[in-house]
Image (spheres, rainbow, N blue to C red):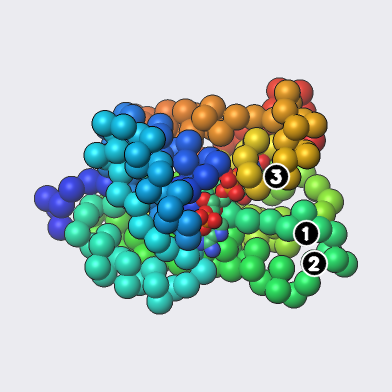
Amino acid sequence: MADNKKIIWITGASSGIGKALTFEFTRNNIFVIGTARRLELLNRIKKELGDCGNNFEPHLLDVTDYAAIDKFHKKILSNYQIVCLINNAGTTSFKKAIDDSIADIENILRVNLFGGIYTIKTVLPDMLERQSGTIINILSMVTQKVFTSSSAYTASKSGLMGYTKVLREEVRDKNIRIINVLPGATSTEIWSDEIRKKHNDSMMNADDIAKIVFRIFSEKSNMVVEDIILRPLKGDL
Ligand SMILES: NC(=O)c1ccc[n+]([C@@H]2O[C@H](COP(=O)([O-])OP(=O)(O)OC[C@H]3O[C@@H](n4cnc5c(N)ncnc54)[C@H](OP(=O)(O)O)[C@@H]3O)[C@@H](O)[C@H]2O)c1
């Protein structure tokens, strides 16, 4: 296992922050396995990457499907050394608690909370055996401040934050870094076109988030950036 090719696995790589992360890491000569449900978008990204496309391997994967993740690990990931997992896949409804259906709530929790835990459980045994690895979770400002119309989303992101804070202490002496990134409003397709147009000047850019994440990942000293808040300079929406 030790000689296997080193890769990083980015979930939700088909758009927004995940796509920007894919560009940033592959351009810095790091091999990325990018997963999402929209394989056609992942394939398009591979083309858009040009020469750096050689550093990108797209795969169809729904993070809510643990059986599919387990199969993907056995067939694909186990051929590589996963030096870093970026738990980025995410979704929300932007509805008030009263308006969220049970299906809406379950979907948000399945993608953002269970999806994150499933992928962590998948990579953790190998990282523990190697006594090295990095798990980066793209959480949210909702873990720090109350935003209405995001109750299930807040529960999911706060849930993964709680899970990973405990995990961090359990693996600290195994040389595994747990890094939680807490962005505020970033202009991606998670938001409606209307909101993005209205707040275009104040929303953050996914490419800027990706650059910071790459810098944190690349830190080689005995220091780790554990939780990082990234907010629009002009404040929250
Ligand atoms: N934009 C913001 O303001 C903001 C702020 C804080 C945190 N975040 C977090 O940043 C992360 C990325 O979101 P984004 O803003 O870049 O939005 P986005 O463009 O909508 O990206 C969401 C990504 O998640 C993937 N995804 C959704 N459901 C999935 C599933 N069941 N299985 C696998 N992949 C799934 C999507 O891919 P497919 O649809 O192809 O599966 C897509 O690649 C999310 O965790 C989000 O909560 C965003």
Q: Position of residue 202 (x, y in %)?
A: 73, 26
Q: Is mark 3 within 8 Å of ligand 1?
A: yes
Q: Nearer the viewer, residue 195 or 125?
A: 195
Q: Pointers 1 and 2 in contact (CB under 8 A)?
A: yes
Which quadrant holds residue 206?
top right
The residues bearing labels 1 and 3 have C-alpha atoms spaced at a distance of: 16 Å
Residue 102 disc label: none
Q: Secondary structure at mark 1?
A: helix
User: Which quadrant: the C terminus?
Assistant: top right
What is the quadrant of residue 46 in the picture? top left
> In the image, is the residue at mark 1 within 8 Å of ligand 1 by its beta carbon?
no
Q: Secondary structure at mark 3?
A: loop
Above or below residue 18? Residue 93 is below
Left or right position of 13 against 109: left
Report, in whole angstroms, how far the alpha carbon at label 1 lies from the one at label 2: 9 Å
| N-term mark: 1 or 2 | 2
Contact between labelled residues 3 and 1, with CB atoms less than 8 Å apart: no
Q: Which residue is mark 3?
A: 191
Rendering coords of residue 135 (x, y %): 42, 49
Which residue is depicted at the point 48% across and 36% down?
Answer: 20
Give the numbered dot on residue 100: 2
Disc on the earlier residue, 1 or 3: 1
Residue behind mark 1: 151
Residue type (three-letter) at the residue carrying disc 1: Ser
